[in-house]
């Protein structure tokens, strides 16, 4: 790593996660520097989503340590982790389909008490995704795929997190919308939020990120600056289709 | 850790006081009956303290080794491993000599136990093997009982002639109930079977012309036996009605043994394995070519058939039936037997049948607390030993897998 | 009474009975919505509410409050009954349901059934096998409503049920906790990721649902004049039918289902042999489950799984 980002906001040390007897994460070690965009790329089933779920506390790490701002969080339940300032936009646009767009965003701000700040962030989310503003009374389930993805990201932003975890924001979306979403991710980052991104769309992810990790079957096999990974022959062959 | 537990204890005690004191204190007039209320409250608090002590002691011991089976499991395994001749032989001998040494009352209790064992074994096919929760099971028992009663009273059919008709009727009812529930989810199924069970009871209760309504039917003949004699120079068949309790006991014993053999065979057959496949994962079973529709119907039909046999015997033994013998509570009792014994475990069900039916009979003063205890046992079993007293060897692993998962989840 | 008045009378009766079923059905629907479990013990919670109601009411009657502070008396009776059952509901959830939250459906159902048997027999042992009479506080006067006679107690019960349902709707849609409850019901994992304490929301569900059932229990006691340990069973099946008919998990559905079941029952009893009215309700329940398990206002299965 040739760039200095100061402190690491998140550190994973030798994290192992199991689904029943399936060893899903076989010792993940990685760091996310404060203020950066870090991406984790890899094929389907490599364990990318599991990594994010383990950070969020939805899945338990059976071994290893997870440090967030120097504090151990691997034993905390998800709601406590959320309260510390980690938000996740989950895979597959899991929004509350029977709640309105507005209510979905309000749920994002569940833990916040600052009414004005919530209002401001709501405006900010609407400015990032104007389409949500037009539909704010509509039920989440009636939105299109891209709109649901935006809502999921918007909901996570409403948590005012220090670290934003994004799980496959491009999944199943049209190229134009993907571009729009990645532009927004960079915009969010410029506002000072650290972003940890999981993607199958390696090209998009690496162009947007500062640092990249490559994952294969539960292990991290490569780590480098994102720009360096973009030039890496193996990565090009395996993930960039060149 | 201890501080937290004590805090919990205080909260639980407050809850217990709020729940118990009004409900047990004010039972008649406005006067507060302190003695009884505080007695029960005291028992509750004692249990809570005991629980705390156990927890503290446990926390000081190393965590249990997960690979090592617990004591009841080891006992279960041992029981499964002892050659059949050493367990079944003495058991059969004991059952066979029981009427010779016991008084009439004990024999009567024995007969009741055996009836419930038959019912438990039948329900076990539906709940234990096939994984379908049936809360109206007692209805098939009613069908068997009323079929025999009506056929005997109206048309003079003997027990043996009426039995197959009753069984077929029971099986048909089983299919009628089973058919609409085939694609239903487990919890809906429970409610539908409960509804069917009640419908059958209400029909028996309301259809005065046929069933004599709540008065019930009486005067049915006991089960007959036939034996040949050579009298007056020719071969003749003599009909002997089983009126004595020992006779009836041997009769139901034979029925029970036949059912045990039948269920055992089913359990180990292709059909049994297919049922278990359905229980474990219906979609996967269907995809691998198991005809789930037919097999589920068959499970209902078989279970209903066994219950009909028990019902016909019950009606013949008592010479009297009325709709109140077939309340929802009876379904619950049979279900408790299956649950306590270990879902899917034949020896477990036999033992549980005897424990749950005989113990309250013997300790008469505890009779009132019987259902209270059944309810508590059912919930407690589900929480601490969902696999039952003597788990079926196959069932064990499945339950524990789920528990491990639960433990891993955040508390 | 002419025919139109007779019909009107039956409609009022249906509205009355339907409101009670609806209140009980709400408890099923809320609990099912959030933990996907049929709370078999709900009928017993309803009965417990009726018992606490009669205990409190008898006490207040003895000190003469029924005459002097009539409204306050009703307020206290309903308040205490609902509070008691809310506590009981929370305890029930903690003891019998929480440990099985990740277990198989069969285990959870059997645990619920066990609690139902336990509570029902507990009440039998403590409160006796026979009917316990409710003090008649409403008197026998009726209002002449276009020829139909509506008793004061019916008016009061219908109004109170309406207020409770509106209150619930407000809670669920307008308050932070209510929204958290709906969020938990829709997606528990995501709710946790947003910082919602799902133990707390489930606990609140187990306070509100049973409390509504308790209110229905007191209403039944006030109207029919008696309470018995096993009266929860029949109300449970009917309210369950209402919840299913409306679409389990849906709050407006439970209300609609309650009114329909009440209507069917009253209509049957008015024109056909009333001994068979329960058979009709059960048949409706089975038909709905068979023909349209998602109910009238329910989400389709696919939606529920989101």
Image (tube, coloured by chain):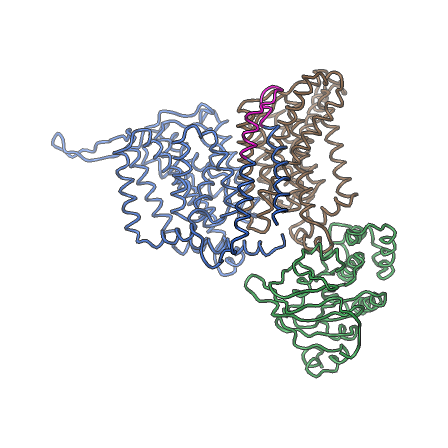
Chain colours: A green, B blue, C brown
From where the camera sits, is residue B141 visible? yes
Q: Quadrant of the C terminus of chain C?
A: bottom right
Quadrant where the N terminus of chain C lies?
A: top right
Q: Position of residue B217 (x, y in %)?
A: 40, 25
| Vertical position of residue B21 compared to residue B294: above or below | above
Residue B287 position (above or below residue B99): below
Q: Which residue is pictured at 63% across the width and 22% down the height?
A: C224
- Asked where in the image residue C210 lies, by quadrant, the reply is top right
Q: Residue furthest bottom?
A: A233
Q: Along the line of sight, which residue is nearer the eye, C186 or B378? A: B378
- Magenta range is B24-43
Tell me residue C77's x, y (percent). Answer: 70, 26
Q: Position of residue B125 (x, y in %)?
A: 43, 47
* Above/below status of C69 relative to B325: above
- Magenta stretch secondary structure, dominant: helix
Q: Could you tell me which residue is drawn at 59 percent across and 44 percent down?
A: C97
Q: Residue at (59%, 57%) from the top-left corner?
A: B408
Front residue of B182/B95: it is B95
In the shown orientation, is residue C258 left or right of residue B329?
Answer: right
Assess whether residue B42 is covered by the magenta stretch: yes
The residue lying toward the viewer, choosing from B146 and A45, is A45
Residue B292, image x, y percentages: 49, 53
Q: Residue furthest left?
A: B233
A90 and B324: which one is in front?
Answer: A90
């Amino acid at each position: 790593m040739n760039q200095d980002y100061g402190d690491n906001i998140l550190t994973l040390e030798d994290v192992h996660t199991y689904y029943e007897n399936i060893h899903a994460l076989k010792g993940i070690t990685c760091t996310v520097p404060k203020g950066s965009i870090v991406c984790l790329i890899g094929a389907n089933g490599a364990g990318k989503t599991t990594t994010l779920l383990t950070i969020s506390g939805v899945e338990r790490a059976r071994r290893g340590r997870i440090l967030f701002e120097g504090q151990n969080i691997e034993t905390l339940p998800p709601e406590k982790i959320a309260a510390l300032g980690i938000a996740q936009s989950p895979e597959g646009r899991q929004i509350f389909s029977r709640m309105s767009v507005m209510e979905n965003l309000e749920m994002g701000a569940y833990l916040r008490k600052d009414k004005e700040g919530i209002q401001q962030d709501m405006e900010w989310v609407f400015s990032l995704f104007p389409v949500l503003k037009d539909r704010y009374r509509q039920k989440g389930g009636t939105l299109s795929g891209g709109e649901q993805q935006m809502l999921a990201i918007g909901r996570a932003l409403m948590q005012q997190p220090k670290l934003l975890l994004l799980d496959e924001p491009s999944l199943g979306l049209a190229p134009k919308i993907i571009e729009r979403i990645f532009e927004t991710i960079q915009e969010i980052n410029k506002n000072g939020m650290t972003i940890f991104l999981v993607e199958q769309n390696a090209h998009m992810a690496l162009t947007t990120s500062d640092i990249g990790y490559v994952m294969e079957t539960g292990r991290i096999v490569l780590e480098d600056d994102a720009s360096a990974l973009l030039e890496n022959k193996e990565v090009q062959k395996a993930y960039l289709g060149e | 850790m201890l501080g937290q537990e004590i805090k919990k204890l205080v909260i639980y005690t407050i809850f217990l006081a709020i729940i118990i004191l009004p409900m047990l204190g004010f039972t008649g007039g406005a006067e507060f009956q302190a003695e009884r209320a505080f007695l029960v409250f005291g028992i509750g608090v004692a249990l809570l303290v005991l629980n705390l002590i156990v927890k503290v002691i446990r926390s000081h011991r190393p965590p249990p080794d997960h690979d090592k089976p617990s004591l009841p499991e080891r006992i279960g395994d041992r029981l499964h491993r002892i050659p059949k001749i050493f367990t079944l032989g003495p058991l059969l001998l004991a059952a066979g000599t029981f009427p010779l040494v016991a008084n009439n009352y004990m024999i009567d209790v024995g007969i009741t136990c055996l009836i419930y064992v038959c019912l438990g074994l039948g329900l076990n096919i539906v709940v234990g093997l096939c994984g379908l929760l049936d809360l109206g099971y007692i209805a098939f028992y009613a069908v068997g009982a009323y079929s025999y009663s009506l056929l005997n009273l109206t048309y003079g059919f003997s027990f043996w002639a009426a039995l197959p008709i009753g069984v077929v009727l029971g099986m048909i009812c089983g299919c009628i109930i089973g058919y609409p529930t085939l694609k239903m989810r487990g919890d809906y199924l429970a409610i539908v079977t409960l509804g069917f069970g009640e419908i059958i009871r209400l029909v028996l209760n309301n259809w005065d012309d046929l069933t004599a309504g709540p008065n019930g039917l009486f005067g049915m003949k006991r089960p007959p036996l036939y034996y040949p004699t050579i009298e007056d120079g020719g071969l003749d068949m003599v009909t002997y009605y089983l009126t004595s309790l020992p006779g009836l006991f041997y009769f139901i014993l034979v029925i029970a043994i036949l059912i045990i053999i039948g269920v055992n065979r089913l359990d180990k057959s292709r059909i049994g394995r297919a049922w278990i496949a359905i229980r474990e994962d219906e979609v996967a079973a269907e995809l691998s070519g198991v005809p789930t529709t037919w097999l589920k119907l068959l499970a209902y039909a078989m279970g209903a058939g066994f219950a009909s046999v028990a019902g016909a015997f019950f009606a013949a033994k008592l010479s009297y039936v009325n709709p109140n013998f077939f309340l929802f509570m009876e379904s619950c009792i049979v279900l408790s037997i299956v649950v306590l014994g270990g879902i899917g475990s034949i020896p477990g069900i036999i033992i549980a049948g005897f424990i749950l039916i005989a113990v309250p009979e013997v300790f008469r003063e505890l009779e009132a607390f019987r259902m209270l205890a059944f309810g508590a046992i059912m919930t407690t079993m589900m929480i601490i030993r969902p696999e039952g007293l003597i788990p079926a060897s196959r069932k064990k692993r499945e339950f524990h897998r789920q528990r491990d998962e639960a433990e891993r989840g955040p508390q | 009474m002419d025919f139109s008045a007779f019909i009107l009378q039956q409609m009022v009766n249906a509205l009355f009975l339907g409101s009670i079923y609806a209140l009980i059905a709400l408890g099923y629907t809320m609990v099912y919505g959030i933990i996907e479990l049929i709370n078999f013990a709900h009928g017993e919670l309803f009965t417990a509410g009726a018992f606490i109601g009669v205990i409190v009411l008898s006490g207040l009657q003895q000190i003469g409050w029924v005459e002097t502070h009539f409204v306050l008396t009703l307020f206290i009776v309903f308040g205490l009954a609902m509070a008691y059952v809310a506590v009981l509901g929370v305890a029930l959830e903690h003891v019998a349901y929480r440990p099985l939250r990740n277990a198989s459906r069969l285990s959870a159902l059997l645990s619920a059934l066990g609690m139902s048997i336990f509570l029902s027999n507990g009440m039998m042992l403590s409160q006796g096998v026979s009917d316990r009479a409710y003090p008649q506080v409403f008197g026998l006067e009726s209002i002449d409503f276009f020829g139909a006679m509506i008793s004061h107690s019916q008016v009061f019960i219908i109004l109170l049920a309406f207020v409770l349902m509106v209150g619930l709707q407000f809670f669920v849609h307008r308050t932070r906790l209510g929204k958290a409850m709906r969020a938990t019901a829709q997606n528990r994992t995501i709710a946790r990721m947003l910082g919602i304490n799902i133990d707390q929301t489930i606990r609140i569900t187990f306070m509100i649902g049973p409390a509504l059932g308790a209110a229905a229990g007191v209403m039944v006691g006030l109207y029919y004049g008696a309470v018995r340990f096993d009266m929860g069973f029949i109300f449970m099946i009917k309210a369950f039918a209402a919840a299913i008919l409306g679409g389990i998990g849906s709050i407006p559905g439970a209300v609609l289902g309650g009114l329909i079941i009440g209507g069917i029952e009253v209509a049957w009893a008015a024109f056909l042999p009333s001994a068979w009215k329960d058979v009709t309700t059960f048949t409706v329940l089975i038909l709905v489950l068979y023909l349209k398990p998602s109910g009238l206002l329910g989400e389709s299965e696919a939606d529920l799984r989101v």
